[in-house]
Amino acid sequence: MGAFSGFYKKTIPERIEILKAERGLTEEEAKTLLNSGALDLETADHMIENLIGVNHIPLGVAPGFVINKKEYVVPMCIEEPSVVAGAAKAAKLAAQSGGFSADADEPVMSGQVQLVGVPEDALIKFEENKEEIEKVAKELCLGMERYGGGFRKAEASLLDTKRGKMLNTVFLVDVRDAMGANTINTMLEGIAPLLAEKIGGKIRLRIISNLATRRKARAKCIWKKERIGEDAIEGILDGYELALHDIYRCATHNKGILNGVDAVALATGNDWRAVEAGIHAFAAMDGYKPLNKFYKNEDGDLVGEIELPLAVGTVGGSIKTNPIAKIALKILDVKSAQELSMVMAAVGLAQNFAALRALGTEGIQKGHMKLHASNLAVLAGAKGDEVDAVSKKLGEEKEYTVEAAKRILKKLRGK
Ligand code: HMG
């Protein structure tokens, strides 16, 4: 990752040149990145309704991630200072200890068809007709079989609700490198009439579930104590322990993890709302808990582990329509949705490590304000070397305002 050392000190054009050399970005792709209007109105007008413009969220990269011995430069789309820096620092410290190991489940998603007003023997009727139901479901997923995926199985449960008996039928499909919503929802709408014909009742919801518990990714890292120091380890363990015992802390602990996960989901054109919904539901399955865990091994090193349900894709949806998402996936250089989910799990773990390490020692504001100061310097009109000079002075004067930055800049320019 030598080419990326001190990446943050480079100018934007210099960073793009490094990505061209290290990640094979074309001139065209470089121009797209440098032209922040990459998503043109016409393309965007085909993505959502009532379009009036395009919002812009900063896109950065966190270099230095070593996962399963492969080096990654991770694109992150986020407006919050210090998140990218924290991920990069955590990755660098992790790489010095051997990096992350990660793995992911097969990309199996589930979808539900709801039948209301069903007879008492609805479950029996489902079982009696299950063979035919699964045969038709399989036919409706033949397209996915071309890629090695396809229909896996159907299950059902009878719910006794205050609105009467409902049959909740669940269909499992391996959706390979797609997030899976289109594939599954189309199949569900196709199979629903057969279910109603064989079982009775009225068709209501036919929709994917965002709780992708069959499609989890895991990451683990051992940060060596000689690399990060005893105090950092104890601080992280104390921070983690509080999250284990206090839901108010746990919400913020998990938000820190999702800072990283969402930033990668957004950069790669994925549905980060689906990711968030599934992850928080997963965290709450046995009472809301941290998404990861930290503990010391017998050598006194810090071990971090995370497991997340991740319904993300590298094909389909807006992933291929959004030029920035295509470039972000090229920079990330993942070969499958499973590999993408492993990277996201590692980034989530790294993000939490960075936050707890800072929170448990010097506090978050030191790093945060150092980065915020350069934002203020830019807002005040500072260019090139002036940015560092102004942000340094802001830190010395401990006055983080645009007015202070303008005053310092004016003095710097001798006006
Ligand atoms: P530092 O010690 O000044 O960094 O830390 P360093 O000089 O040792 O540099 C080490 C590496 O860090 C660099 O490697 C970069 O990769 C990266 P190099 O390029 O030198 O080979 N790095 C940076 N990357 C981009 N821009 C920068 C930068 N500086 C270093 N400016 C740092 C500085 C900010 C990284 C450190 O203070 C830190 O990690 N702070 C914590 C950041 C963080 O986690 N912020 C929280 C985001 S908000 C959040 O998580 C919500 C929260 O509520 C969650 C929770 O409560 O749990 C906090």
Image (cartoon, grey):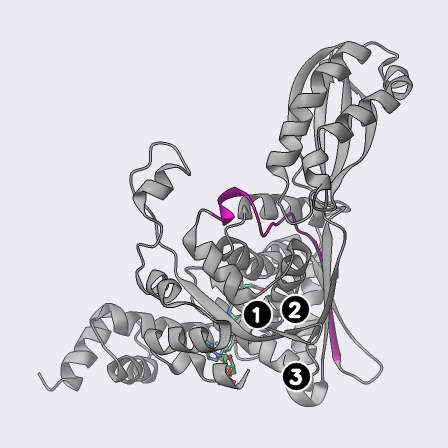
Residue that label 1 marks: 355
For the residue marked with disc 2, what is the amino acid? Gly
Q: Earlier in the sequence, mark 3 or mark 2?
A: 3
Label 2, secondary structure: give it.
helix
In the image, is 185 to the left or to the right of 404?
right
Looking at the image, which residue is at 71% across and 24% down? 113
Label 1, secondary structure: give it.
helix
- 247 and 407: which one is in front? 407
Q: Residues within 10 Å of mark 3 (few under 14, many from 20)?
A: few
Report the magenta residues as a range: 302-320
Residue 366, visible in the rendered structure: no
Residue 265 rendering spot, x and y as whole percentages? 54, 54
Q: Earlier in the sequence, mark 1 or mark 2?
A: 2
Vertically, is 316 above or below 182?
A: below
Mark drawn on residue 239: 2
Q: Residues within 10 Å of mark 2 (few under 14, many from 20)?
A: many
The Cα atoms of the two marked residues, 3 and 1, are separated by 14 Å
Residue that label 3 marks: 231
